[in-house]
Amino acid sequence: MFTRSAIRKFLSAAVSLLMFSASPAAEGYSTDPTILKGDINSDGDVNSVDLSVMSLYLSGRASISREGFLSADMDNDGSVDSIDLVKLRKLIISKDTKTSDTETKPGIESPLSSPIDRTKYSFSSPINRFVDSSYVFTDNEFIKAPLSDMYGSLTSQGSGRVCIFYVDFPGCPYEYEPSLDEIRNAAFADESPSLSSFPHESINAFYKRASKHRVNISGDVYRYTTLHHKGYYEENPSRAEFIDEVLTNMDEYVDFNSFDANGDKTIDAIIISVPETAGEDHWWPCAGRYAGNFNNTIDGLAPGHIIVGNAEIKSADDSQNFVSSYIHELGHCMGLPDYYLYDQRSSEGLHGSAGFDTMDELFCDFSCASKLMLGWYRSNQIQVYDYNGDDEQTFILTDAQSENGSCVIIPCGNAIANDLCSEFIVLEYTTLNNNNKSIPEKYWWLRFGNGIRAFHVDAETTSQNGYKEFIYRSGNNPATDYNRGRRFIRVINDADIDNLYRCGNVLNSSVSGFRFYDSDGSETVDPHVEVHIGELVGDSYIITIRKEG
């Protein structure tokens, strides 16, 4: 868990996202085979011109004919709405993917031609063209998580089970005593967008949205009061005696086998929450592999990652600190490092309006870099710039906070590692929707908004103590030259400014951080490309990457 230490009163740079409303009264639906679905302008083809017309229609800025309406009703439900827009976009992308290796025929407009200037685009290939590995599926299913065999005990794909102990000390009780059901709801309840606490209505709900419903976290909650005052346990920095006591004394009440969802004989994750008044010096939330003297297995299982922290539920209507803190810590249980910098004067690792990731800040979504490592993209949502391809390549970046969120990777060199554990630049279109909805309220003094952001990632791994981990995870260690050299993640143009990019902006080597690392760990290697940010169509940006020189 981390909270920015220095409050800077910046004016908000929020940029409102164009929202689309449902269509006017339906004119009926049609399954007439002569109706070409998606051909809204009735020119005999389905392309981005139709996509632009539908976007303008949904925003009330254009009208369409009855035939156009029937073509735009992609799901035949008698109305034209955002669902039809998504279906049309998928159809256009699917068409282009099937014809990406063939020359565009004269007289036929490219599916991704700009509705403004009709420029012919050379559309990108999905990631499967660049890797040959079990890490990537070929049928547009979720990729395998690169960190699935790393330092983590909680799966980032599928069902995970978390055991929560809500613990207090003699003389240090909770100011508010929630019921076990309240704690269960804060941890495991399903999505409830209507709640005032949205998007932090529960840990599980947040993870479901972030992972595009790839993850489901469930579990149970138990109450315990320690045998000693809190000072007794603070003599051991690892809290080993404290953890041993909780696990040993609760063993007869808990079937720990129910917290091994993937059957690997390791408990997925344990959270031991203590009162906020226990203090930050010794009880600041943190997660890690168990480091105590508990040599015996628990119900035949090994302890996995254990979180200890003083993030509590403050009232029946306020569990946001509890939820957001343990979202961050469970990210560690899945294998992600911290992104903030240890023992630095400016301890945030990522700055500006582009610098929000829950592994650096609370109350915000995971970034594309995190989601790549966690396996929260379908293979058709990952696009890769091809250095051996056309001089100009075009990509679509869809709202990262949506189910269709996509990203674009610029590899370091001509290839990308099969498991994505390599150096690359990755771009996404981030918004203030869904899991980022709390940013304006929680970080009102910072810049924020909607736009394209880019990260420089070095996800190379090493093996230590029998497990793999990221070499350049943020922290005070020689591998990162004590945070001055290579790092797992940097935001490009890292400064307390509006560093999101929008239509007309260009990213190239003149932008701070838009370079790869040299042998000394400095960002000096020019990628020799320019990223041109195009127009925003619906919930997607069109970007073009061009070779320099």
Image (cartoon, rainbow, N blue to C red):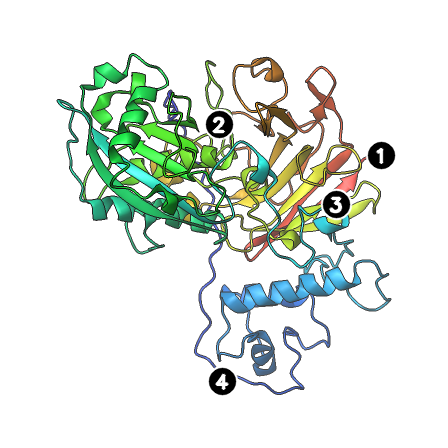
Q: CA distance from mark 1 to mark 3?
A: 27 Å
* Labelled disc at residue 28: 4
Which amino acid type is marked by label 4? Gly
**In the displayed structure, does residue 123 sit left or right of residue 365?**
right
Q: Which residue is mark 2?
A: 338
**In the displayed structure, does residue 422 sit left or right of residue 431?**
right
Residue at the spot x=67%, y=37% of the render? 506
**Dot 3 lies on which element?**
loop
Q: Is residue 425 visible?
A: yes
Q: Of the two numbered discs 1 and 4 on the same chain, state the one appearing first in sequence.
A: 4
Residue at the spot x=58%, y=26% of the render? 466
Q: Which residue is mark 1?
A: 549
In this view of the protein, which residue sits in the foreground, 160 or 378?
160
Residue 420 location in percent, x, y?
67, 38
Which amino acid type is marked by label 2? Asp
**In the displayed structure, does residue 149 sit left or right of residue 25?**
right
Judge the density around disc 4: few (<14), some (14-19), many (≥20) Cα neighbours within 10 Å: few
In this view of the protein, which residue sits in the foreground, 139 or 155?
155
Q: CA distance from mark 3 to mark 4?
A: 46 Å
Q: Which residue is mark 3?
A: 131
Q: CA distance from mark 3 to mark 2?
A: 28 Å
Q: CA distance from mark 1 to mark 4?
A: 54 Å
Q: Of the two numbered discs 1 and 2 on the same chain, state the one appearing first in sequence.
A: 2
